[in-house]
Structures are given as C-alpha cells and as structure tokens.
Amino acid sequence: MSILKNAGQALLGAILTFAGISHLTVSRQEFQAQVPGWFPIDADLVVIASGVVEITLGLALLTVWKQPARGVLGAVVALFFIVIFPGNVAQWLEHKDGFGLDTDAERFTRLFFQPLLILWALGVTSAIRTLRDLRRARALKS
C-alpha cells in the first residue's frame, strides 16, 4: 500500500508542479477564465500567485515523505483545492470557456473532479490519520 501512496503522492506533486508552471506560461489566459468576475484582485495576478503556490505545493509533495510533515502537507494541499473550488464554480456560472470546457454541461461535470483531488491529497499522504494523531498527542501533553 505504501508504494501506491508514494506513487500517488509523486504523481499529484508532478501534476501540481506542471499546472503551476502552466499558470505562468502557456495556459495563463486559460487559467484566467477560472478567476471569478466578482473577485477584487486582477485575474492575471491571481493566476500568477496561484501558479507559484501550485509549484510550491507540487515540489513539496515531491520531496516531503516523512510523517507528520507529509500528512500536514496533504491537508494543506487539500485545503488549497477547496480554496480554488469557487473559481471552478464561477467558470461554470459565468459561462467562461477554458481548457476545452466550452459548454455549461462540461463545466458543471468538471466540478465533480475537485472532491476527487481533495480525497487524493488526503489519502496518499494519510493526512486525516496524521492530523488525528497530532491532536491526540497534543491533548495528552495538556
């Protein structure tokens, strides 16, 4: 099982790193379609900042393997996926094309993949178990 978790973590790290680099280069305009129209910060700045965060998280997933840091990292990655989810919803609600998602049905279907990314990050890093263990250890110290 640990081989699968390690491979899953490495794959997620590679995907995030690639996506982050894409934010800064070839897919910059595509990612701008995911910035909600109501968001008060310039879309290009949001894309650049989120790209840097994705690269950082991706590289961390490729280098952090020991617990509890690995589990905490997995929770942070899952939280990142939660934080950017409104952008995916906005792309659907605002009817913005991007990444080949040219219909509302395609954009809506995509929304169901974000929870899978969250579960992936939590699962391959054993984040939930790690956070639970950290909470128990903290409670014992009190």
Image (cartoon, helix red, strand yellow):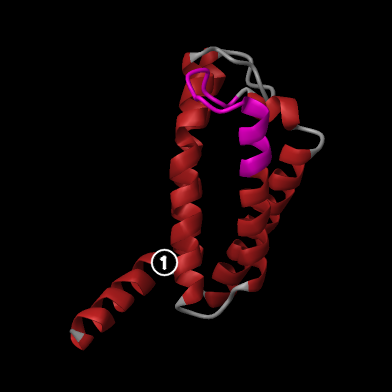
Above or below for 103 versus 39:
above
**In this view, which residue lies farthest toward the right?**
26
Between 71 and 25, the one nearer to me in the picture: 25
Q: Position of residue 14 (x, y in %)?
A: 70, 56
Task: Tell which of 77 and 128 is nearer to you.
Answer: 77
Q: What is the quadrant of residue 30 in the picture?
A: top right
Q: Amino acid at mark 1?
A: Ala
The residue furthest bottom is: 141
The answer to whether residue 45 is magenta is yes
The quarter of the picture where residue 101 lies is top right
Describe residue 62's horizontal placement relative to residue 137 as left or right: right
Q: Is 22 on the left or on the right of 124, as rendered?
A: right
Q: Is residue 112 toward the left or the right of residue 141 in the image? A: right
> Would you place residue 26 above or below residue 97 in this image?
below
Residue 13, picture quadrant = bottom right
Q: Residues within 10 Å of mark 1 (few under 14, many from 20)?
A: many
Please state the horizontal and vertical placement of residue 91, each as a whole percent of the image.
54, 21
- Position of residue 12 relative to residue 115, above or below, is below
Q: Is residue 67 above or below residue 14?
A: below
Residue pointed to by mark 1: 127
Residue 120 location (% of width, % of height):
50, 55
x and y, in percent, of residue 56 in the image = 65, 57
Q: Which residue appears at 47% of the width and 35% of the height?
A: 85
Looking at the rendered image, the quarter that the C terminus falls into is bottom left
- Magenta residues (range): 34-50
- Please report the residue visible at 46 percent of the width from the left and 25 percent of the height from the top: 89
Q: Is residue 1 magenta?
A: no
Residue at 64 percent of width and 16 percent of height: 97
Q: How many marks?
A: 1
Under circle 1, the secondary element is helix
